Image (cartoon, rainbow, N blue to C red):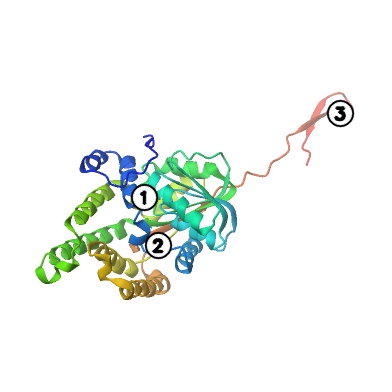
């Protein structure tokens, strides 16, 4: 399916557009992410300071180890630029290119880069047909993008195509099969409980206006369409290996942190933001930090990787094999041609 041709953001999808997108995952991705572009950083507490620089670099290192820095990095499904911009600030990449199906997201990512003084260009593009030359980048990254791409076999072939030999890809924030199940159930239960209880008189001031709740419900309907995959870690590795990658590795993270984080995020989306304030934000962040530490240092030693929420995968485009000189021919003293391998 070809990527949509429109390059103008469409920040407010109508119900008719939502209905049309139910059978078109790429259109759904455009509508959903255009919808989210203006408030995405606020919704997910994204920033471009030390907090999120550390978060992005730590995710990168968890997958790829102490590799880099890279000269030119490409981010697929860039969103507002959260992953690549913070990796650039953290010294992982010197310059960057961002792509996304959503014009609104590309627009915000470029604006964020300009505000940070980073060397970045961007374009609206499909991860299944990356508009870049062969062997043109040193690093390909993405955060929470692979599960949106319908044809992952094709996408990984494209990733390997645009990487230079020896170049690396790193993708983080991909939902595992079991993690997605408990995250969705917790989110749905929290949304129902919050929107039901805030109908009661004493709690009515905690209820968002009905038009905002209705718009969130339409966005949630699109979200069910844009999420194309959940992953068993071994399955994610197989996509990369099938495309020809080497040194492929998938790790997982966030178990207790996800069990805490998804209800918190859903609650925050269901109530007026001014009701929560800075103390709440610090409570949520510090608790998530502590639980993430527990998951990394304790739970990961005893819990199977498939039970964690987030999967991270990395791999490398192989170097071409060392060339062996072709045989050269020369005449022997008796007039016959012989061959020898010259080094």
Q: Are circles 2 and 1 on residues that touch, CB within 8 Å?
A: no
Report which residue position mark 1 lands on: 147
Report which residue position mark 2 lands on: 46
Q: Earlier in the sequence, mark 2 or mark 1?
A: 2
Q: Secondary structure at mark 3?
A: loop
- Please state the horizontal and vertical placement of residue 240, each as a whole percent of the image: 46, 48
Q: Is residue 336 above or below residue 58?
A: above
- Please state the horizontal and vertical placement of residue 272, each as a whole percent of the image: 24, 65
Residue at image location 30% in from the left, 72% down from the top: 277
State the CA–CA distance, disc 3 to disc 1. 64 Å
Along the line of sight, the residue nearer the viewer: 197 or 260:
197
Q: Residues within 10 Å of mark 2 (few under 14, many from 20)?
A: some
Regarding residue 56, the answer to whether it shows in the image is yes
Q: Quadrant of the N terminus?
A: top left
Residue at image location 52% in from the left, 44% down from the top: 160
Along the line of sight, the residue nearer the viewer: 151 or 215:
215
Q: What label sits on residue 332 in the rendered view?
A: 3
Q: Are circles 3 and 1 on residues that touch, CB within 8 Å?
A: no
Between tags 3 and 1, which lies in front? Answer: 1
Q: Residues within 10 Å of mark 3 (few under 14, many from 20)?
A: few
Furthest-top residue in this view = 335
Furthest-right residue in this view = 333
- Please state the horizontal and vertical placement of residue 2, each as a whole percent of the image: 38, 34
Image-quadrant location for residue 329? top right
State the CA–CA distance, disc 3 to disc 2. 74 Å
Along the line of sight, the residue nearer the viewer: 106 or 291:
106
Asked if residue 305 lies left or right of residue 219, the reply is right
Image-quadrant location for residue 288? bottom left
């Amino acid at each position: 399916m070809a990527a949509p041709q429109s390059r103008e953001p469409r920040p407010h999808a109508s119900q008719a557009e939502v209905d049309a997108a139910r059978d078109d995952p790429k259109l759904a991705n455009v509508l959903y992410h255009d919808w989210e572009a203006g408030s995405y950083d606020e919704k997910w507490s994204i920033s471009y300071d030390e907090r999120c620089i550390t978060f992005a670099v730590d995710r990168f290192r968890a997958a790829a180890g102490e590799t880099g820095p890279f000269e030119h990095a490409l981010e697929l499904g860039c969103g507002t630029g959260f992953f690549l911009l913070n990796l650039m600030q953290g010294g992982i990449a010197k310059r960057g290119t961002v792509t996304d199906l959503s014009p609104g997201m590309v627009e915000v990512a470029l604006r964020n880069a300009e505000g940070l003084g980073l060397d970045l260009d961007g374009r609206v593009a499909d991860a299944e047909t990356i508009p870049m030359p062969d062997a043109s980048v040193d690093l390909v990254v993405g955060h929470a993008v692979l599960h949106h791409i319908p044809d992952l076999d094709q996408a990984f072939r494209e990733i390997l195509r645009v990487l230079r030999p020896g170049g690396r890809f790193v993708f983080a924030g991909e939902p595992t099969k079991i993690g997605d199940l408990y995250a969705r159930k917790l989110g749905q239960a929290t949304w129902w409980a919050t929107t039901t209880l805030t109908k009661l008189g004493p709690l009515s001031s905690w209820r968002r206006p009905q038009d905002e709740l209705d718009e969130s419900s339409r966005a949630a309907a699109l979200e069910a369409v844009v999420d194309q995959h959940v992953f068993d870690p071994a399955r994610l590795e197989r996509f990369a290996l099938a495309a020809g990658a080497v040194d492929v590795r998938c790790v997982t993270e966030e178990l207790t942190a996800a069990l805490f984080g998804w209800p918190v995020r859903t609650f925050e989306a269901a109530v007026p933001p001014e009701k929560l304030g800075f103390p709440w934000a610090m409570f949520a962040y510090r608790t998530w930090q502590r639980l993430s530490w527990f998951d990394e240092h304790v739970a990961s030693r005893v819990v199977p990787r498939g039970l964690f929420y987030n999967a991270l995968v990395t791999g490398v485009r192989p170097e071409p094999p060392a060339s062996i000189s072709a045989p050269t021919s020369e005449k022997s003293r008796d007039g016959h041609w012989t061959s020898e391998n010259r080094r």
